[in-house]
């Protein structure tokens, strides 16, 4: 397998994982919204995922997804600090940021990675 | 390009980031890389692996990168091995803190895998030049 092919396998694997992670964050967010009493554990779990996403998405060439994950990550960090005293407006703001991330995830394909067509031939040492 | 195959210890808990960086360092960069999923793993294996440079994530469950750095520094063989922090926690005050601890450099996440190896090579050369001059 060439380096280019290896990189494409990595991109495809990471793209699929990022989409799965968006689903996981959505599930957690729904649980938070439904629970009434806001659970710090659920927020922490969601934030742990968005933290992973911002690093992985940005590093594998999905800059737009990485940026959206970063904004949601910051929002969830802020919610963690307020856990127990979160207003419906704050939860709605979080939901809007999630919907943005979700819509990016729905239209993202491996080929959209900025690394997908990268010329690696000049890079290998 | 260097004359010998440099050895890197790379410590990162996130398997997705690990796979990208490992590709960049090993396949693109040609480095010999010992990939560790945690600080304790790095502390256990690094004395035998004897890396030329260590790359540390900061936010890791259990022992974080800062504590790992301190423990690695207590190992005589690794006390002067250059350490790079590769982290999303890279605000100016955070970078200043890592540098004050004795880090060789800080690489912010997300990183560009296409230039990561080149950057590591430059940092290694700079560290060697400084060591030779001292």
Image (cartoon, coloured by chain):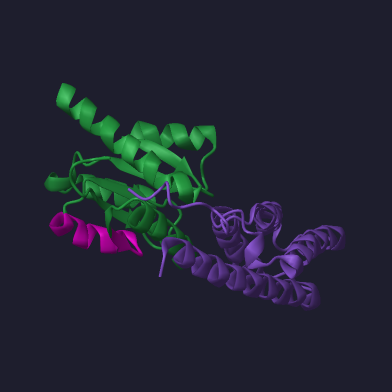
Chain colours: A purple, B green
Query: Which residue: 43% across, 64% down?
Result: B19
Kindly give the residue lying farthest to the top in the view shown: B133
Q: Quadrant of residue A100?
A: bottom right
Q: Quadrant of the C terminus of chain B?
A: top left
Magenta stretch: helix, strand or loop mostly: helix
Give left or right: position of B35 versus B24. left
Q: Position of residue A120 (x, y in %)?
A: 46, 52
Q: Quadrant of the N terminus of chain B?
A: top left
Can residue B73 be seen here? The reply is: yes
Q: Quadrant of residue B76?
A: top left
Q: Nearer the viewer, residue A91 or A5?
A: A5
Q: Position of residue B133 (x, y in %)?
A: 17, 22
Question: From which residue to which does the magenta span run?
Answer: B34-49
Query: Which residue: 41% across, 54% down?
Result: B24
Give left or right: position of B7 versus A5. left
> Is B42 part of what is drawn in magenta?
yes
Query: Which residue: 46% across, 54% down?
Result: B59
Give left or right: position of A115 versus B49. right
Kindly give the residue lying farthest to the front in the view shown: A121
Above or below for A83 versus B131? below
Q: Position of residue B32 (x, y in %)?
A: 25, 56
> Is B2 part of what is drawn in magenta?
no
Above or below for B3 versus A14? above
Q: Nearer the viewer, residue A125 or B96?
A: A125
Can residue B14 be seen here? The reply is: no
Above or below for A39 versus B117? below
Question: What count of labels does the image hold?
Answer: 0
Query: Which residue: 63% across, 71% down?
Result: A21
Q: Position of residue A49 (x, y in %)?
A: 59, 66
């Amino acid at each position: 397998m060439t380096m280019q092919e290896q990189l494409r396998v990595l991109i495809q694997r990471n793209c699929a994982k990022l989409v799965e992670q968006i689903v996981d964050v959505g599930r957690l967010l729904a649980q938070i919204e439904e629970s009434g009493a806001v659970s710090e554990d659920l927020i922490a779990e969601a934030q742990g995922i968005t933290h992973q996403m911002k690093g992985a998405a940005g590093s594998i060439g999905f800059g737009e997804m990485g940026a959206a994950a970063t904004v949601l990550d910051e929002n969830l960090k802020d919610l963690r600090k307020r856990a127990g005293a979160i207003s419906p407006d704050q939860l709605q703001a979080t939901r809007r940021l999630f919907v943005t991330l979700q819509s990016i995830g729905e239209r993202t394909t491996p080929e959209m990675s900025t690394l997908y067509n990268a010329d690696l031939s000049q890079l290998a040492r | 390009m260097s004359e010998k195959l440099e050895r890197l210890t790379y410590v990162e808990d996130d398997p997705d980031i690990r796979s990208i960086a490992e590709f960049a360092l090993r396949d693109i960069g040609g480095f010999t890389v010992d990939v560790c999923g945690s600080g304790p793993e790095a502390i256990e294996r690094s004395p035998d692996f004897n890396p030329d440079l260590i790359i540390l994530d900061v936010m890791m469950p259990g022992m974080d990168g800062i504590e790992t750095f301190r423990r690695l520094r207590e190992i005589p063989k690794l006390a002067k091995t250059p350490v790079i922090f590769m982290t999303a926690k890279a605000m100016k005050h955070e970078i200043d803190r890592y540098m004050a601890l004795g880090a060789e450099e800080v690489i912010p996440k997300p990183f560009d895998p296409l230039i990561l190896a080149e950057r590591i090579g430059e940092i290694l050369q700079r560290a060697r030049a400084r060591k030779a001059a001292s």
